[in-house]
Image: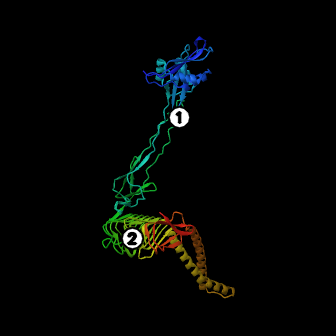
Amino acid sequence: MKKNGYFQLITSGGTTAIRLIPEKDGGEALRINEVANYLKYLKIPFQPRLLDEGLKKHEDTVIPLDAQSRAPEQEMCLITVSDDRMHAVIRFYAPSDNGTVMDRSEIMDEIACNKIQYGVIQENLDAFLKEREYCRDYELAAGIMPKSGKDSQIEYLFSTDTQAKPKLKEDGSVDFFNLSTICHCKKGDVLARLHPELHGEPGTTVYGENLAPPAFEKKVLKFGKNVLLSDDKTVLTAAKDGHVTLEDGHVCVSDIFAVDNVDTSTGNIQYEGDVHIKGNICENYKVRSSGNVFVGGVVEGAYVEADGDIIISRGMNGMDKGVLKAKGNIVAKFLENTTVTASGYVEAECIMHSRITAGDEVIVTGKRAFITGGSVAAANRITAKVLGSQMAAATTLEVGVNPELRQRYTQLQKETADLQAGLKQIEPVIQSSMMKLKQGVKLTPEQVKYVQTLSATSAAHRKKIEENIKEMDELGEQFDATSEACVVVSGVAYPGTRIIISDIPLTLNKEYRYCKFKRIKGEVKSEPV
């Protein structure tokens, strides 16, 4: 049976010595620091070198300390408590050769002096009293850690990611089919589950201190239209067929209007919800949706407007009259001769002779990834492989200003100019009428009413002009460039391409490759990607 090495003070015979007993059968070796601390506690002088030499012998050794006669020393114990106050160990030291041992009551008194009040392991004390093994740690007491509770969790059984973008396939093309932007559901489908919170349990330290369990969060299921809550308030189900979304933490279900094509069989479509068109939207037809519009085929010279996203699997040839307008994002395989406006991002494999505006960015990816002809504007970033063409097709790219703000600024300018022009026509008539009144000329009731109407119109015009100028000033402050606004070319930008960053233009006079155009110190410059 293995035993740790230990030591014993010898005080008989009128001198003082220390006996070093080595470990047995793989027990822990006696540590010089432990012996030294014991002797220091009793204020007995010693020579560390002699102790070290004695320990290295690994045999029962007696080392004289001094010739002074001392009283016997009782068996001792040392109690150590962990930093977290959850564990305590007790270590016993042998009495001197003629000293006495501690009984249970004396050990318990020592435990009480160390303020250990909880979790004392009596069987370990029994083991010591039976074995009397010294310089060994006995587990004295163990506290109880507080058991953590568990926050209530809401498990949504549909995708809550509203920022899904097309993925680039291995062949370099873009997958416009598996976007996962619409989560379909059937009546009775479980949409969300609430997993209730679990309460924790308090803990106790070896000092008897109470430890409160960590706090937990309690959640509730929130829902909107076409969703049912179970009686126990833990399950949400769809009340009808449609698609499910998470809006401000509320689970909602909307219907989807699905047709094969938009043509003579359907006429124009205006729908409160998502519109799913399996085939094509034919020329001159209109589609308006309060949700998302998904087109599985092509869009010809049509008008498509959505409060959400517009996804066109094959692309659009607008025939110079087609329009796409979305408050979300617009994704299409190609865009040609089309006017496109998106509050979010626009993404395609190629853009040709179109007018594109995006509130966030324009991303052109895939095998060809080119922008040729027309104008492309985005608030933050335009990315493409090829800009312009070898034939110097007029191509303009603008970043750094939100196109919607720019459009509003231009609208205010025109409106203000029209109001000022109206004032120039009204005020001479008012001034002439006022001069007549000062000269004593009487005006007919009809003339008085006319002048009053003109005066009211003049006042309204002036007020509106002031409001417009104030709004234009506020918009102008937002037109300053940000360090993030840029045009990125992963291939080549051809001469003749015009790049505008926050009103600072640059017309390329040579080819640029693999670079990024930014506004640097008031100029548009290129830097390596």
Q: Give how far across and how far down residue 188 sits, in percent.
A: 34, 53
The quadrant holding residue 243 is: bottom left
**Image point (57%, 71%), residue name:** 472
How far, Cα to Cα, is label 1 from label 2? 66 Å
Q: Which numbered disc flags the more N-terminal residue, 1 or 2?
A: 1
Q: Give how far across and how far down residue 259 sits, in percent.
A: 32, 66
Q: Dot 1, how many residues are within 10 Å of its Cα: few (below 14), some (14-19), or many (20+)?
A: few
Q: Where is mark 1, residue-wise? A: 84
Residue 497, placed above or below residue 247: below
Asked whether the beta carbons under mark 1 and mark 2 sit within 8 Å of each other, the answer is no
For the N terminus, the image quarter is top left
Q: Amino acid at mark 2?
A: Leu
Name the secondary structure under disc 1. loop
Q: Amino acid at mark 1?
A: Asp
The quadrant holding residue 443 is: bottom right
* Towards the viewer: 346 or 385: 385
Figure coloring: rainbow
Disc number for residue 403:
none
Q: Give how far across and how far down residue 361 sits, in percent.
A: 46, 65
The reply to whether residue 325 is visible in this rendering is: no
Seen from this angle, which residue lies furthest right?
439
Residue 221, placed above or below residue 414: above
* Towards the viewer: 168 or 478: 168
Q: Dot 2, how many residues are within 10 Å of its Cα: few (below 14), some (14-19), or many (20+)?
A: many
Q: Where is mark 2, residue-wise? A: 335
Q: Give how far across and how far down residue 116 sits, in percent.
A: 54, 27
**Image point (60%, 82%), residue name:** 424
* Towards the viewer: 243 or 178: 178
The reply to whether residue 397 is visible in this rendering is: yes
Residue 279, placed above or below residue 101: below
Name the secondary structure under disc 2. strand
